[in-house]
Image (tube, helix red, strand yellow):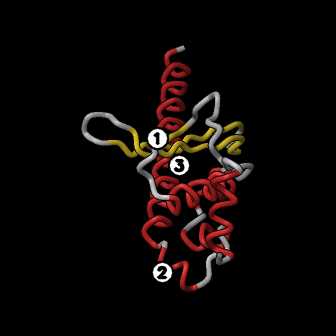
């Protein structure tokens, strides 16, 4: 068994990143038109630091995608929002210890994980900015 497969199985067997945050500050969801959730990534943030990151993957999700999502949770945890926003496909591949062959074979899984991460961070930022705008409006009214 290649080290790449071993690393993916290690993430999956240890259930890395499968504990969802109690308080969700931002999330991204991949679901069908009926609302069935295939993939979800959630983060909890305190003072601009991601304190928790977790993912859910349905049974239909391939192991490489689940492993990439697990790697994303490891990469994001304890990072500032701005630092997490700089993470990309290479970081995910490195966390999974992918060689050139594994990078090519698992390219789609890595791109999905990166897309979920970026959407989660965008949704967090939108929620944060809306709350900030409300606070400023209330302050101006006083």
Q: In this view, does 135 lie above or below 90?
A: above
Depth check: give the residue in front, 93 or 49: 93
Categorize mark 2 by other alpha carbons within 10 Å: few (<14), some (14-19), many (20+): few
Q: Residue 104 carries which label?
A: 2
Tell me if mark 3 has few (under 14), some (14-19) or many (20+) residues whose alpha carbon lies within 10 angstroms of its own: many
Residue drawn at 74 percent across, 49 percent down: 78
Q: Is residue 82 among the parts visible in the rendering?
A: no
Q: Where is residue 138 in the image (x, y as percent from the top left)?
A: 51, 19
Q: Where is residue 120 in the image (x, y as percent from the top left)?
A: 50, 47
User: Can you identify the residue that label 1 sits on?
Assistant: 126
Quadrant of the rendered image containing residue 23: top right
Q: Position of residue 50 (x, y in %)?
A: 68, 44
Residue 19 in view, yes or no: yes
As measured in the structure, the alpha-carbon distance from the residue carrying label 2 to the one carrying label 3 is 26 Å
Q: Which residue is drawn at 45% across and 58% down?
A: 115
**Which quarter of the rendered picture does the C terminus lie within?**
top right
Q: In this view, does 31 lie to the left or right of 15?
A: left
The residue that appears at 65% across and 78% down in the rendered structure is 2
Q: Is mark 3 on a helix, strand or loop?
A: helix
Q: Name the residue under label 3.
A: 121
Query: From what the image shows, is residue 138 above or below residue 15?
Result: above
């Amino acid at each position: 068994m290649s080290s790449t497969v071993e690393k993916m199985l290690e993430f999956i067997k240890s259930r890395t990143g499968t504990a969802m945050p109690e308080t969700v500050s931002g999330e991204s969801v991949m679901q069908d038109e009926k609302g069935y959730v295939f993939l979800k990534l959630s983060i909890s943030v305190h003072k601009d630091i991601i304190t928790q990151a977790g993912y859910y993957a349905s049974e239909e999700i391939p192991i490489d995608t689940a492993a990439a999502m697990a790697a994303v949770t490891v990469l994001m945890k304890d990072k500032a929002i701005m630092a997490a926003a700089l993470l990309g496909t290479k970081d995910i591949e490195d966390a999974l210890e992918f060689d050139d062959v594994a990078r090519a074979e698992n390219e789609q899984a890595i791109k999905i994980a990166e897309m979920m991460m970026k959407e989660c961070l965008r949704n967090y930022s939108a929620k944060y900015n809306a709350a900030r705008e409300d606070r400023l409006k209330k302050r101006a009214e006083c």
